[in-house]
Image: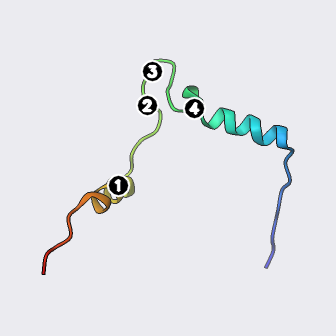
Amino acid sequence: MITCKALFSQEANNEADKILKSKSHILNVYGENMRETTNEGIQTMYMLTRFKDKK
């Protein structure tokens, strides 16, 4: 088994966190969502919101 671990500075982690939480990471220049919901995402939302069957 091979394991690869990378070390990043705290400054790099803070910068990456800032980018991931920014609106420009989610929206394009037209203000539209850049992320697409896949079938797995739709199925997950359905499974989280469906009612349990009463027996």
Mark 4 or mark 1, whichever is nearer to me = 4
> Label 1 amino acid?
Asn
Of the pair 4 and 21, the residue shown nearer to us: 21
Q: Return the residue at label 1.
A: 39
Q: Return the residue at label 2.
A: 33
Q: Return the residue at label 3.
A: 31
* Colour style of the rendered protein structure: rainbow
C-alpha separation, residue under disc 2 versus residue under disc 3: 7 Å
* Residue 9 image point, x, y percent: 87, 44
* Residue 48 image point, x, y percent: 32, 60
Mark 3 or mark 1, whichever is nearer to me = 3
Q: Please tell me whether mark 1 sits on a helix, a strand or a loop.
A: helix
The residue positioned 45% from the left and 18% from the top of the image is: 30
- Asked which quadrant contains residue 54, the reply is bottom left
Total count of labels = 4
Q: Is residue 23 rendered to the left or right of residue 47?
A: right
Q: Is residue 36 rendered to the left or right of residue 17?
A: left
Q: Return the residue at label 4.
A: 25
> Label 3 amino acid?
Gly
Q: Is residue 21 rendered to the left or right of residue 5?
A: left
Instruction: Mark 3 or mark 1: name the one nearer the start of the chain.
Output: 3
